[in-house]
């Protein structure tokens, strides 16, 4: 099987509540779709994303280069493609944009491989679980990270009614001790219904963040995510060793080496990986194998429709993230009952953009052999 063409599309999906903070600000989810076609007539799709269409220009350029590199290759030989591509892109780095470009294609490669074997991704990865525990990210109700607690409570109640039992709230824009009080109030209002994780998103200083984490250590959080800057390995390890509450990090780690370094140098109980950064499904699979040997729990970052399959197909994965940003693009929300989602049986990775969406692309490029 050989890749004959790669079609790239950019969709600008408006957010119901624009994000406005120092880390990620923008009014839309820019989604880069790669449609990979083969000489056997099997087509696969993979997608990447960023906040705001301006940032997407970086990623589309990298994906164009990766697509040109992939032409003529067998998409089911992902490891061979990655090995050659890393040698090719070494001069500009084996992480960052170069990795993001090929990661988007890698998802499409797995989509092709699954379709060729007539299997859904969860089964293709080994079929470890029949259903995936999923948590609801409340960011859609609280894009600023500063919403009053009663707003968060209403979002929790709506999520509970729709079948979720685990939740995550974003913090970090208020002074740390103010947010610590907000978290405590939200947990108390949940009254034992479900479990809460919080995401600081690297916004607090080292001393202030540690103080707030200790203040929240007695309320039974599922985890505290990215309480320090992503490169502050020593500070994060100190929190891991001194808190009862688990620390979660990893969404900004690239390739396989990044997640493994986090496991070895930070030792956090949860590692969260983003498919666009970790090397797509190939990178996820390799990092997950290492996590299993370290007794580290894996969790997905966004990618909810694919995430259901990743959790089901990965022994180390215990829970996945859901937010509704791609529901319209990918045919609707995932169905959750009593905190779990059952993956579909259709062959592929579980995320397919309908042809009716293609005319809505704000940019496209078709890369094919001469």
Image: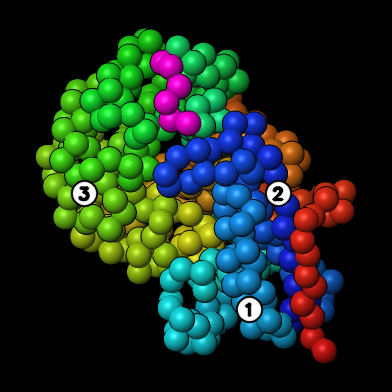
Is 146 a magenta residue? Answer: yes
Depth order, front residue of 325/317: 325
Residue at x 27% of width, y 19% of height: 181
Task: Categorize mark 3 by other alpha carbons within 10 Å: few (<14), some (14-19), many (20+).
Answer: many
Res. 305 visible in picture: no
Q: Is residue 71 left or right of residue 194?
A: right
Q: Is residue 285 above or below residue 185?
A: below
Residue 141 seen from this side:
yes
Query: CA gap, disc 2 to disc 1?
Result: 21 Å
Element on which disc 2 rests: strand
CA separation in Å, label 3 and label 1: 35 Å
Return the x and y of residue 236 as percentages of the image width and height. Answer: 21, 49
SS of the residue under disc 1: helix
Q: Secondary structure at mark 3?
A: helix
Position of 248 relative to 267 (above/below): above
Residues in magenta?
Answer: 144-149
Query: Where is residue 324 drawn, in percent x and y?
Result: 62, 35
Q: How many marks?
A: 3
Name which quarter of the figure residue 77 lies in: bottom right
Q: CA distance from mark 2 to mark 3?
A: 35 Å
Image point 83% across, 54% down: which residue? 358
First along the sequence among labels 2 and 3: 2
Residue that badge 2 annotates:
12
In the rendered view, would you say 112 is above or below 139?
Answer: below
Instruction: Name which of mark 3 and mark 1 comes first in the sequence.
Output: 1
Q: In the rendered image, which residue does mark 1 sit on?
A: 65
Which residue is label 3 attached to?
Answer: 236
Q: Residue at x 62, y 77 (%)?
A: 66
């Amino acid at each position: 099987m050989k890749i004959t063409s790669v079609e790239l599309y950019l969709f600008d999906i408006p957010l119901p509540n624009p994000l406005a903070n120092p880390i990620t600000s923008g009014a839309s989810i820019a989604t880069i779709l790669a449609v990979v076609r083969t000489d056997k007539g099997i087509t696969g799709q993979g997608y990447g994303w960023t906040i705001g269409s301006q940032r997407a220009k970086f990623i589309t350029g990298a994906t164009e280069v990766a697509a040109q590199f992939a032409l003529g290759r067998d998409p089911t030989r992902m490891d061979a493609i990655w090995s050659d591509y890393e040698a090719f892109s070494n001069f500009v780095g084996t992480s960052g944009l170069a990795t993001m470009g090929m990661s988007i294609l890698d998802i499409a490669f797995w989509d092709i491989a699954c379709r060729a074997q007539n299997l859904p991704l969860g089964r293709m990865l080994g079929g470890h679980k029949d259903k995936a525990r999923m948590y609801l990210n409340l960011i859609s109700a609280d894009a600023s990270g500063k919403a009053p607690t009663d707003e968060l409570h209403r979002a929790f109640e709506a999520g509970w009614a729709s079948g979720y039992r685990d939740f995550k709230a974003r913090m970090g824009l208020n002074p740390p001790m103010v947010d610590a009080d907000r978290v405590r109030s939200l947990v108390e209002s949940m009254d034992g219904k479900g479990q809460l994780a919080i995401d600081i998103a690297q916004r607090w200083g080292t001393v202030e963040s540690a103080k707030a984490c200790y203040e929240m250590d007695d309320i039974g959080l599922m985890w505290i995510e990215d309480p320090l800057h992503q490169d502050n390995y020593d500070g994060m390890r100190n929190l891991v060793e001194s808190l009862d509450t688990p620390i979660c990090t990893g969404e900004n780690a690239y390739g396989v080496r990044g997640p493994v370094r986090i496991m070895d140098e930070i030792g956090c109980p949860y590692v969260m990986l983003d498919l666009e950064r970790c090397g797509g499904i190939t990178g996820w699979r390799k990092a997950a194998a290492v996590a299993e040997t370290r007794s580290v729990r894996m969790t997905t970052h966004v990618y909810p429709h694919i995430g259901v399959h990743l959790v089901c197909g990965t022994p180390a994965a215990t829970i996945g993230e859901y937010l509704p940003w791609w529901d319209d693009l990918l045919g609707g929300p995932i169905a959750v009952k009593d905190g779990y989602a059952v993956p579909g049986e259709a062959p592929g990775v579980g995320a397919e953009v309908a042809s009716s969406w293609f005319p809505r692309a704000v940019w496209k490029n078709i890369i094919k052999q001469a």
